[in-house]
Amino acid sequence: MDYEGKPADSAYARVMADYPGMRAVLVDDRLLNFPPARRANMITVLIEETPVQEQPDAYAALTVFHEEAKLLQEQRAELVDFTLRRVEELDEIWDEVVALAGKR
């Protein structure tokens, strides 16, 4: 089996190939998964139950590699379209997500 999961670019490409001409939304709680989603032109929603500034070891929690996590935090504005505290809030912004998908 040739399975590759997130954050491999091929995983995102496979999803997009399965739904040609459609838009996709990544809803995730790990910034590590956002760069390939952005490269696949997906709309991105970060679920951040506890803001980074409230987590003493936030960078270590995001990924094993401190420098990579720091870089992801620096790129956050470019990678994340929407940020929510809880996934249950997704319905509150869904119209905005759909509108953004129509612009890309």
Image (cartoon, rainbow, N blue to C red):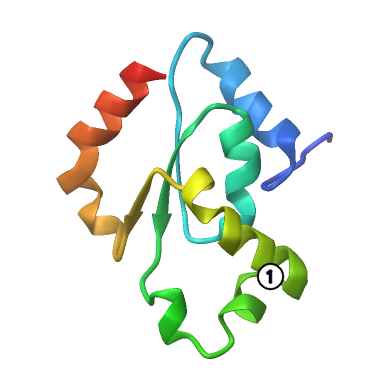
Image location (x, y in percent) of residue 45: 40, 47
For residue 98, side relative to residue 81 (left or right)? left
Q: Nearer the viewer, residue 78 or 64?
A: 78
Q: Quadrant of residue 62?
A: bottom right
Q: Nearer the viewer, residue 72 or 33?
A: 72
Count of all numbered marks drawn on residues in the image: 1
Identify the amino acid type marked 1: Thr
For residue 82, side relative to residue 17 (left or right)? left
Q: Is residue 41 above or below residue 8?
A: above
Residue that badge 1 annotates: 63
- Furthest-right residue in this view: 1
Image location (x, y in percent) of residue 95: 18, 32
For residue 38, side relative to residue 100 (left or right)? right
Q: Quadrant of the N terminus?
A: top right
Q: Residues within 10 Å of mark 1 (few under 14, many from 20)?
A: some
Taking the spot 24% from the left edge, 57% from the top edge, the residue there is 88
Taking the spot 36% from the left edge, 72% from the top edge, the residue there is 49
Image location (x, y in percent) of residue 48: 40, 66
Q: Nearer the viewer, residue 31 or 72?
A: 72
Q: Quadrant of the C terminus?
A: top left
Q: Quadrant of residue 99?
A: top left
Image location (x, y in percent) of residue 15: 59, 27
Taking the spot 56% from the left edge, 80% from the top edge, the residue there is 58
Taking the spot 83% from the left edge, 34% from the top edge, the residue there is 2
Q: Is residue 37 above or below residue 18?
A: below
- Furthest-bottom residue in this view: 56
Instruction: Identify the secondary structure beneath mark 1.
Output: loop
Q: Is residue 82 above or below residue 20?
A: below
For residue 93, side relative to residue 29 (left or right)? left
